[in-house]
């Protein structure tokens, strides 16, 4: 076993990016993810990389667009309002098919809201906060160890599909410390990028990075190509974990930190004779539809628990497709549900 | 004669009033206020000229000066 | 006995949340005093920024609007155009005004909006834990310039007053400082004039106030004021840039 | 074994670093650990706290709704957290700063003049270490030896010369009993 | 019958706003909605109103925030990329509960995309392109006459609920001319706004407009209040039309211009012995769930037709909830499906 | 026979989509000639704006990146930081650079990014049908200033070179014009120098080119050039603002 | 009755205003009308076209996939649209500018030197009116009288003096037959 | 003697070359080009000085000048 470190989630994201070969970071400060920037501001110069604090989130995402055009691994990070400001840029990057990693350490909204943890940007991330038909891979880790692994993965996925990958974590995940081991993970740093704009060197045809296609036939074709890519990603890149679902009375769907709370609830419920299963989507997009289909016949009902007003709920309902009721329990504004209140919700379902 | 009064519980112990008093009569008290700071006060009110500097620089509107 | 200095009416009688010795509080009191003296509390609308002073809507007794980071001049434009009778001021930090809000401040000035902006320049992002601001001085160490501000990477500090002075619609521009009593007196004079400029419909008015952030500078409050005097004023010269002799 | 510790006080009292060292010690003992600081919107010295879990099993939620031990370094913290301590749990308070008394008779209470003692030792920032000493002796949450190791790992080299003193502070807390 | 005018959709939006008592417009030019601005630039000064071209979409939406705070009726308009840039501001306005009307004349994305008509911003509009849990009323007219009526309505709805109302139309709708009659519609211009920041006049407590709530209990409470309001809107403000659904073989779901194409398809299908029904959501949010539930037992299947890759599709599936298959046909990039290809899709369904 | 003027290699041999007599085309040819003369086609990366020249990525033979409206300087920053060996230029209109992109241009300049910006100021939004730009002249009628630009509502035209001149990281600043042959020659000189400044790592360089939009100005192409001479140059004085004598 | 007309040419030839007048006439006759201009990204004279529907019933889609009549004012337009004209429909072309010949024998073809004639009449912008004249006489899509009314409604007052000339142009097209 | 050649089909008939020619020898032709414009040409090549002005101002790179 390798060396273990006790680190803050935000620092682990930064360290993971460095280990994934990311040498370019552009961002604008915002709580609760600033430690990512502080860490990289220190470390990037040591490895010959660039840490640049942009004048705004809008500028930052467009610097990412530029660096990604030039074929390098690049990351930005922010939190909810800052991510909203990046929506135009995200849509551009998606359309131009540039690989980029975006971190959203979510705070509670809407508006300036608060800075405590939330999951209220789920819709924005998976349905597309920007304009047009695009998708980005959205990964929701639930531990610091997983945060490391998924961050490295995010770079690989991005390069492989020329897509954006978003790491989405609640504020807690950025702020908490846990043990992490920097295991070697598969990391395809040196992928060829013949499409990148690095200068023709008078040796090849010029490359153009663009997101505008004036002729409708061409733009439709480009959209079809994007959609085909998304289908491919849906086929290959689903990440999900389920526990205890085989004979559950109630299956809870939860991601990120909330899934950890559920894992506390399972033994509590067991004591009261209730079998609780857990499906934890790790990739929020592509959503693990099949996992829900697989267990749709098992429980009396599903319960989705989120730190929002009911967002992943819709994807769970789409996946369950009317086969079983899907209940919801949510907390907002930075509040975190405790085990007892979730157990109470579960009991309500089993009683009814 | 001037009068300088302090809303002690608002004082954050920053000592700017101490630094600015031309008569050097503003001091920090030993006790703690509700916030856990040593609050400022005037040690010898008779020397006060009522210039108001202490109040003008106090960031927390702790001080009122009359003359 | 007459009152020499006391809490102005326009300032709420509640504790403020700023760090010990943070000069945001001084600037607040000055603004409130000016509102009192001009007797405009009832028609003034203040706009709070995103920064350490995000919630100064609690501290001023007039109507207040909290704006998104950097957008106070746009929000102010909306309010002022909707009701030109109001006196509208924005209160903005250097991250807010000189980084993310660059477009908004320049164009409010360009349009000559009848607004008064109080620009609190403490050469750092206070609220988010001391990151580099566009106004951070050369070699200054911050949490995102851990090796100091270096020209090659970060360029040189942005001089907002000098920048805005090239814009015709910005009719009153002054840089002041609250590092000592004289500075405080001058700051108040400048802010008062900036309000009057608005009230006489002349155009856009801004007062930059050099201010301290003892917490993120890692200095005692008194040391921080010295740092303003020694370092900041050296780079950001105080004084009026425009409109000094304007009749209002 | 699962120890759920809340440490709470003003910002600047070393609440977070106490939590961090504690979690680090747990890690050295191959336990699962988590440490979640509260984070407010402000840089400016409000109440700060941190949730530490040291456990033999994988840790579920890092958020503590109740605690086995509570260390408090100011009055508001005691007020806020005393009710979340489980029956049979313990409260360790810095009696230099906390003058209220918890309203519980189902827990063990340790009251140590940590800040004053630290001040007397010449370094007020050792108060948190003193309190941790008591936590360690009262719960056995981690081993004293590992505490020293942890300090060597966590502190930057230029502060290593302080470690003997810190261990003294720990020892003081470890052995402290109200006379 | 009143006087009829032949007008462009974009001009009708502008005229409707004026007739609704809107005297403040802030916007930034973008095709295909610029005529709104041109019209108002001419007319606003004539009625003592303000037309202001902002320096950016971001500034424009924040000017809207300001003017709405001051209690006046205010509008902005843009098209897809510009709407993306407004997402932070939209979330702020929603959280601060300010009434405002936003027009999105949608062009085809993602990225800079093209300027031809599309419906690819459906998700952004109804799921929330900005961060946090908020909703805005989204109205999708399908004719110029309806465009007029819904635009006036938008101001009333906004004021009534202190919410954003978005008028969302495909590029076509902004560009085409049709007959319009400016019927008097209910128009509650003089609603009281005691919360507005207009100066205390030293006569009342100060008003504060804000979207930040630092205490989690308070922010959760505020979120619950918002959610309760949204429930209320869902109860009162659903707008939908259905034709021919009572005994349809296939029910098509379509909004905006696409619904007009379907109305051409219905008689064509009739000739071939296929009964086609149409459900046309006019309010995209709140979505007319009940209308779909009502007819869910009727057809063999549903078919959703959109100018995107399948967005309203999800809401239709959620409403139908597994009771019947829901098929999809979409065109992208500015392409418009013709009647024949839709009929072919319908036939595929009836044949299968 | 020697060639006096011909299509430069760096310019693609395809028709351009601009309106008859639109000077965007002239500026394109000049840039391509400079790229040829400096022999940098193989390492140059151009950034296209949003505006009438949105698709000039088709016209230059080097690698090209199309940027979102106003963001070219940010995109350029990303590219240049990723690969400092490249020569990176942005091509931006006055809506793109002086309105929505204000923050990006000011901060690229502030950071002293090693970029070359060609700023085509035609005092109007060409592409979207002739709306007012920040650079629109006083009294100029546009589709969004149908009664002319009026100070009270719109403020005064923004002078970008003057504004940027206050920024230390902007080391080469010049305003030129393509309204006549002399102007064209000077424009080329300025652009060439602006590229060289980048290549010698001095900092940010910008050339503002006064340009025509016959279509939206409602003038013949020749009349439009006269209007530049008579009206635009009068308000926007030509010449070097910074870096004239810089060794490169 | 439903007339589906596509008018196409270069930008600047009055394609859009022809469509607008036509729709306006239809409105005066209490028909349902729609007029959808094509809009490109460019201000700059590419090909422009517009889809006009005049119908007794409510109009479904304003987008025409096929047309009953086509007016073309340049070669590319003919190439692009000739195939969408329904059997039995008609094509009216400005023979001053269109020299290609449609490849259809199931439609009626009218070829009028509209631009040249308009030029001769002293106002080249009347070409579109001439072509509309032919459309009206060939299809009866709207009444000639209403055309004049429409002009008075649509044109700004200062251009009303041109209307008699425009009606002349219309008349010319209305009565034109290839000799 | 100078030679001025025109890629006629690229000409948009803007007449800037006409305006700028110091010898006033550039004219617009009567015919239409493929785009529908009257293209420019030189009426009396002998008078041409080969100054290149016409080519320098042509926005569409229609003109090449040799000398
Ligand atoms: C869109 C957005 N980006 C970033 C932030 C995070 N943020 C909050 S305050 C701040 C900077 C404040 O600095 P300054 O304006 O200088 O004010 P100070 O705190 O120094 O008074 C930032 C970046 C935010 N709230 N919203
Ligand atoms: C975010 C965004 N806002 C607005 C537009 C619409 N738009 C396209 S070009 C343009 C203005 C172009 O003006 P300018 O930069 O001066 O270039 P010109 O066409 O005059 O050369 C605008 C506003 C857009 N494409 N994207
Ligand atoms: S009023 Fe002047 S002299 Fe008196 S205590 Fe204050 S600063 Fe000192
Ligand atoms: S200046 Fe004010 S807050 Fe600071 S020590 Fe003096 S009284 Fe206290
Ligand atoms: S962080 Fe700095 S600016 Fe903010 S309140 Fe503290 S001292 Fe003031
Ligand atoms: S619209 Fe103006 S700027 Fe654009 S191509 Fe035409 S003339 Fe040039
Ligand atoms: S080269 Fe000079 S003289 Fe010859 S045609 Fe061109 S402009 Fe005239
Ligand atoms: S300048 Fe060029 S495009 Fe214009 S008329 Fe002359 S040759 Fe033709
Ligand atoms: Mg600051
Ligand atoms: Mg322009």
Image (cartoon, coloured by chain):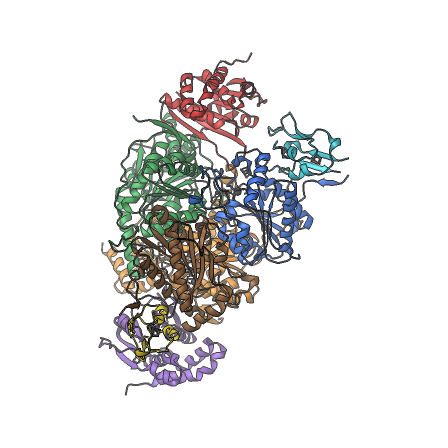
Chain colours: A orange, B yellow, C brown, D purple, E green, F blue, G red, H cyan
Residue G88's x, y, as percent?
47, 18
Which residue is drawn at the image coordinates 52% and 17% (left, top)? G110
> Looking at the rendering, in which quadrant would you find the N terminus of chain F?
top right
The quadrant of the rendering that contains the C terminus of chain F is bottom right
- Can residue E100 be seen here? The reply is yes
Q: Quick check: F53 left or right of G69?
A: right
In this view, the residue farthest toward the bottom is D179
Camera-side residue of C245 and E144 = C245
**Residue A15 drawn at (x, y percent):** 49, 65
| Residue A197 visible to the viewer | no
Image-quadrant location for residue E177: top left
* Residue A93, position as x, y percentages in the image: 50, 50
Q: Is residue A223 above or below residue A159?
A: above
Q: Position of residue C238 (x, y in %)?
A: 47, 63
A305 w.r.t. E303: above or below? below
Would residue C74 be found to the left or right of residue F31 on screen? left
Q: Nearer the viewer, residue C115 or E8?
A: C115
Q: Which residue occupies the extreme top position in the image?
A: G179
């Amino acid at each position: 076993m390798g060396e273990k470190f006790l680190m803050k989630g935000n620092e682990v994201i930064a360290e993971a990016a460095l280990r994934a070969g990311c040498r370019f970071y552009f961002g604008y400060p915002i709580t609760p993810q600033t430690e990512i920037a502080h860490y990289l501001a220190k470390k990037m110069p040591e490895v010959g990389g660039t840490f640049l604090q942009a004048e705004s989130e809008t500028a930052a995402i467009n610097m990412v667009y530029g660096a990604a055009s030039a074929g390098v691994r690049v990351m930005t990070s922010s939190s909810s309002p800052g991510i909203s400001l990046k929506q135009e840029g995200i849509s551009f990057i998606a359309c131009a098919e540039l690989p980029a990693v975006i971190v959203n350490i979510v705070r509670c909204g809407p508006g300036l809201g608060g800075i405590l943890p939330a999951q209220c940007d789920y819709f924005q991330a998976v349905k597309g906060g920007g304009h047009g038909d695009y998708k980005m891979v959205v990964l929701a880790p639930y531990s610091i160890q997983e945060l490391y692994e998924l961050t490295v993965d995010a770079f690989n996925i991005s390069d492989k599909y020329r897509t954006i990958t978003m790491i989405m974590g609640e504020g807690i995940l950025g702020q908490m410390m846990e043990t992490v081991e920097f295991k070697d993970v598969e990391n395809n740093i040196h992928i060829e990028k013949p499409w990148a704009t690095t200068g023709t060197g008078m040796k090849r045809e010029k490359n153009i990075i663009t997101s505008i296609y004036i002729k409708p036939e061409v733009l439709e074709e480009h959209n079809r190509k994007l959609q085909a890519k998304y289908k491919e990603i849906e086929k290959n890149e689903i990440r999900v974990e389920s526990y205890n679902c085989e004979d559950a009375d109630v299956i809870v769907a939860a991601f990120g930190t909330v899934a950890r709370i559920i894992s506390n609830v399972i033994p509590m419920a067991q004591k009261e004779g209730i079998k609780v299963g857990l499906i934890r989507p790790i990739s929020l997009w592509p959503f693990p539809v099949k996992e829900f289909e697989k267990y749709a016949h098992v429980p009396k009902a599903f319960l989705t628990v989120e730190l929002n007003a009911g967002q992943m709920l819709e994807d769970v309902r789409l996946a369950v497709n009317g086969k079983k009721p899907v209940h919801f329990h949510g907390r907002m504004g930075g509040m975190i549900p405790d085990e007892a209140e979730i157990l109470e919700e579960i009991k309500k379902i089993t009683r009814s | 004669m001037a009068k300088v009064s302090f809303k002690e519980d608002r004082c954050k112990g920053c000592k700017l009033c101490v630094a600015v008093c031309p008569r050097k009569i503003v001091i920090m008290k030993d006790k703690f206020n509700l916030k856990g700071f040593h609050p400022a006060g005037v040690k010898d009110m008779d020397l006060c000229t009522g210039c108001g500097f202490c109040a003008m620089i106090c960031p927390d509107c702790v001080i009122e000066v009359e003359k | 006995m007459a009152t020499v200095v006391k809490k102005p009416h326009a300032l709420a009688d509640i504790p403020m949340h700023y760090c010990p010795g943070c000069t945001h509080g001084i600037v607040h009191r000055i603004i409130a005093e000016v509102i009192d003296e001009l007797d405009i509390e009832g028609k003034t609308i203040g706009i709070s920024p995103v920064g350490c002073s995000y919630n100064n809507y609690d501290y001023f007794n007039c109507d207040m609007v909290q704006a998104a980071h950097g957008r106070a001049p746009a929000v102010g434009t909306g309010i002022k155009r909707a009701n030109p009778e109001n006196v509208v001021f924005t209160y903005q930090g250097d991250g807010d005004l000189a980084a993310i809000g660059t477009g908004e401040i320049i164009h409010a000035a360009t349009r000559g909006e009848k607004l008064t902006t109080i620009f609190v320049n403490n050469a750092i992002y206070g609220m988010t834990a001391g990151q580099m601001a566009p106004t951070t001085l050369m070699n200054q160490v911050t949490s995102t310039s851990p090796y100091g501000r270096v020209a090659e990477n970060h360029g040189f500090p942005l001089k907002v007053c000098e920048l805005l002075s090239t814009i015709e619609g910005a009719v009153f521009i002054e840089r002041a400082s609250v590092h000592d009593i004289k500075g405080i007196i001058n700051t108040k004079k400048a802010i008062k004039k900036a309000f009057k400029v608005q009230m006489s419909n002349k155009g856009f008015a801004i007062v930059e106030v050099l201010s301290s952030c003892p917490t993120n500078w890692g200095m005692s409050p008194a040391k921080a004021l010295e740092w303003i005097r020694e370092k900041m004023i050296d780079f950001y010269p105080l004084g009026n840039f425009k409109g000094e002799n304007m009749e209002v | 074994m699962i120890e759920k510790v809340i440490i709470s006080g003003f910002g600047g009292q070393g609440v977070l670093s106490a939590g961090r060292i504690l979690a680090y010690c747990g890690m050295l003992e191959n336990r699962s650990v988590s440490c979640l600081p509260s984070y407010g919107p402000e840089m400016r010295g409000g109440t700060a706290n941190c949730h530490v879990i040291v456990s033999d099993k994988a840790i579920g939620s890092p958020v503590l709704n109740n605690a086995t031990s509570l260390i408090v370094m100011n009055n508001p913290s005691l007020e806020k957290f005393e009710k979340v301590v489980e029956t049979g749990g313990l409260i360790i308070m810095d009696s230099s700063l906390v003058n209220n008394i918890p309203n519980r008779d189902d827990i063990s209470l340790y009251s140590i003049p940590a800040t004053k003692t630290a001040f007397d030792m010449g370094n007020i920032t050792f108060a948190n270490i003193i309190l941790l000493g008591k936590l360690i002796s009262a719960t056995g949450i981690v081993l004293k030896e590992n505490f020293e190791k942890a300090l060597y790992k966590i502190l930057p080299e230029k502060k290593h010369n302080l470690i003997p003193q810190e261990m003294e502070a720990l020892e003081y807390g470890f052995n402290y009993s109200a006379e």
